[in-house]
Amino acid sequence: MSEVAEKVKNIVIDHLGVDADKVVLEASFIEDLGADSLDTVELVMAFEEAFGVEIPDDAAETILTVGDAVKFLEKATA
Amino acid sequence: MRRVVITGLGMVTPLGCGVEQNWAAIKAGKSGIRRIESIPVDDIACQIAGIIPRGDGTNGTFNPDHAMDPKDQRKVDDFIIFSMEAARQAVEDSGWQPTEYEDQARSGVLVGSGIGGINGIVEAGYTLRDKGPRRVSPFFIPGRLINLTAGYISIAHGYKGPNSSVVTACSTGSHAIGDAARLIANDEADVMIAGGAESPICRLSLAGFASMKALCFAFNDRPEQGSRPYDRDRDGFVMGEGAGIVVVEELEHAKKRGATIYGEIVGYGMSGDAYHITAPSEDGDGAYRCMKAALRHAKISPDEIGYVNAHGTSTMADGIEVGAVERLFGDAAKNLAMSSTKSMTGHLLGAAGAIEAIYTTLAVRDSILPPTINLDNPNVETPIDLVPHKAKEKKLRYALSNSFGFGGTNASLIVKAFEG
């Protein structure tokens, strides 16, 4: 797992209070990890803060899974 | 008119978590006032408060994880967490956990707060200033709004009936219970979760009340003696945190399911001072009319009341309330007992009326008068027994609980021992 993926995973565990083994790349925040729409907004904010990047609203709307977040952040911080 | 009884009690206060824990502490005359350690207060004149003992949940300590998932606790101010804990206890105690659609629709929630999420508002204000609007959490609004206590409680327990909040400063808890009882009496619900919650111990509210010279400044080195209603050395109120919640229920509904009945709510009075934004009028007329309205509702005369749980905040207003009670009770005042449990809990603002309604109910249930502690040198002359220092026994049939709030908003509740 990349450094970015590890960091994303920890943020997700922290914010959604879910078990680490559930936070796999395919996991959907809403479908699999019990997040609601407000949780996902807060998650995106936490990613922005942790990675020092800005995630525009239209991009945030495409981040639905852990893998989506990792992919976006790997690109944004490359 | 449909009759309304109390079938569930729950509380978390500076005297501990749980009703029996609280009642034992009240009967023993214990103080829940301590030095504030959780935030810096060196530059604030008042450095003491009624603080909930936190812990793992044993020995009457408060474990927030019993009330709410840790990930949800992060999203809300403490007043919501306190209200969730008190509601959890009260619902469990009542045994009313509706699962049928029709039952849920007839079960509601009416819980308020005086100030709400003031600490979270301060924190979010710093975030806005330092990091900009895009860093303000989406949970900022729903975690601070006062009626989200009622919202969270309804979600946790499936109460889908009337859902509302009261915001009347230090009268909130009493108004919430009275209004909820009225909804039941008016056939708008069969069961209501009702009460108040407050989490005021933060630098901003301490600073605000300190500026008003309303807080106790002189007992920072002796916190347990700080709240001393009717005493010569009283020096202002001591803020407290916590929540009190009751389940109130229509009598036949409660009987049919064999619920334990703690007492009956037979009187509810309200009044406004129309005088000053924070001070009561010297003659205590607002308090007088409020208690009179409650007696009228209960259809009883003052001499039938055996105990008054006073608003008694340990301020200049204490004597005004005593005067109002004397005026209302006349000759019957010499047989009356009246105490301030705030001498032990501190002043829980929007939760005060709710926890005091519970203490009043237990006083009636057990025929016990809670004491006014720290009453070493009374500065009021009255024929009323202010129950100094020690709890005592007295056969009680009716008791009245007073709450008065900034804005000149008053509420009185009358609880009757349940007689079938």
Image: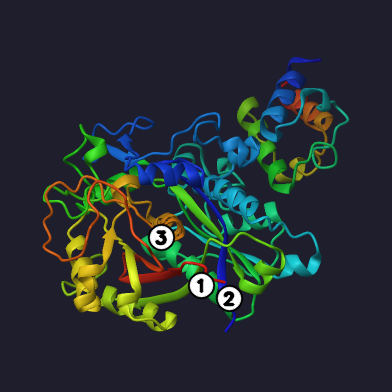
Question: Residue tagged by mark 2?
Answer: B183
Residue B258: quarter of image: bottom right
The spot of residue B401 in percent (x, y) is 37, 65
- Judge by depth and name the residue closer to the eye, B242 or B32: B32
Marks 2, 3 in one chain: yes
N-terminal of the two: label 2 or label 3? 2
Question: Residue tagged by mark 3?
Answer: B353
Q: CA distance from mark 2 to mark 3?
A: 18 Å
Residue B364: quarter of image: bottom left
Question: Residue tagged by mark 1?
Answer: B179
Question: How many badges with numbers are in the image?
Answer: 3
Placement of B24 over or under B104, stated as above or below = above
> In the image, B70: left or right of B102?
left
> In the image, A39: left or right of B332?
right
Dot 2 lies on which element?
Answer: helix
- Judge by depth and name the residue closer to the eye, A69 or B241: B241
Q: Chain of mark 1?
A: B
Q: Residues within 10 Å of mark 1 (few under 14, many from 20)?
A: some
- Judge by depth and name the residue closer to the eye, B47 or A62: B47
Residue type, numbered disc 3: Gly
Dot 3 lies on which element?
Answer: helix
> In the image, A67: left or right of B261?
right
Q: Chain of mark 2?
A: B
The spot of residue B382 in percent (x, y) is 14, 65
The spot of residue B35 in percent (x, y) is 30, 33
Marks 2, 1 in one chain: yes
Q: Residues within 10 Å of mark 3 (few under 14, many from 20)?
A: many
